[in-house]
Image (cartoon, rainbow, N blue to C red):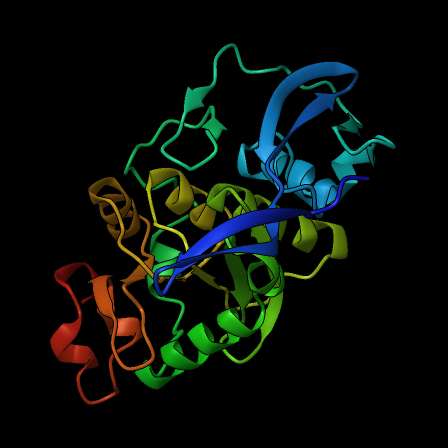
Amino acid sequence: MLEPHLPIRYVQYRRRAFEDLPGKAIVETPVSLTVNGEPWLTFLCTPTHLEALAVGFLFNEGVIENMGEVADVRPCAHGDNVDVWLTHAAKRPASWRRTSGCTGGVTSVPPTPASPPDEGPARRTNGFFLPPERVASLIEMLFEAQELYRESGGVHTSALSDGEHLIFAAEDIGRHNTLDKIAGWCLMHDCWPEQRILITTGRISSEMLQKAARMGASIVISRTAPSSLAIQLAEARGITLIGYARRDRFNLYTHPQRIASSQSRTKLAPQSEK
């Protein structure tokens, strides 16, 4: 199997002097996905949790609903391919849409703000409220989970939380891959908390929001900004979207009533919630 980072040497210029230093570089490598013996696509990813990446990708693309549909998932010995065998036939999408994710993510799901029949309303009225102070605590937990980042930098981290603890954290050079790894891990371990919060270091674009919605997240928290289409999708699907989250502040873009205090929930609730 491939290592997630490789030793390097680099020259640093500091205080008017050059210094030769040892370091580590995060690995970006192509890993192909084969479904029922047919090549589907190639991920550009960091080679960790490859089984979860493959299973989570198929789940987030709507190819599977649960692990009962997966007969076997197996990375090859060299770590450059993952074989997934399903209990049913699966048709490879005729075309993949290149997403805005770093390392060139792909999806076959159209970025439509329309809310599917089983999403949106149920999520908007699930009675889940998160104290604003808890957002800072979750960001701190995310930082503590950044093992590969502390080793080499250059990697995104995302985590699933129930509001109190981190259930699972995933790191990858591609932010979209981190959400696929989380989805796959939850499927493989049959571990879906009732309340689902996704925290990420990456920008929230439409494909990130679509994956979060597919995973049933009520709240998505990012260290950086959401795109305009991500905001539209979050509003339509009843997801509370938080950006620029820091230790002492954050921005609320959609459905703020989940974060507001009990005294201000009524005042902040949008018309669709009343």
Residue occupying the point 35% across, 51% down: 120
Q: Quadrant of residue 270?
A: bottom left
Q: Is residue 111 left or right of residue 201?
A: left
Q: Residue 233 location in percent, x, y?
A: 29, 44
Q: Residue 13 versus residue 221: which sits nearer the camera? A: 13
Q: Quadrant of residue 124?
A: bottom left
Q: Is residue 34 left or right of residue 119?
A: right
Residue occupying the point 69% across, 61% down: 191
Q: How many marks?
A: 0
Residue 240 in the image: above or below residue 163: above
Outermost residue toward the right?
77
Residue 29 in the image: above or below residue 16: above
Q: Residue 65 versus residue 61: which sits nearer the camera? A: 61
* Quadrant that contains the N terminus: top right
Q: Residue 61 versus residue 33: which sits nearer the camera? A: 33
Residue occupying the point 33% across, 49% down: 237
Q: Residue 187 versus residue 104: which sits nearer the camera? A: 104
Outermost residue toward the bottom?
263
Q: Is residue 75 left or right of residue 122?
A: right
Outermost residue toward the front?
17
Q: Residue 274 location in percent, x, y?
A: 18, 67
Residue 109 in the image: above or below residue 209: above
Q: Residue 257 location in percent, x, y?
A: 24, 72
Q: Quadrant of residue 109?
A: top left
Residue occupying the point 25% across, 77% down: 249
Q: Residue 169 location in percent, x, y?
A: 60, 61
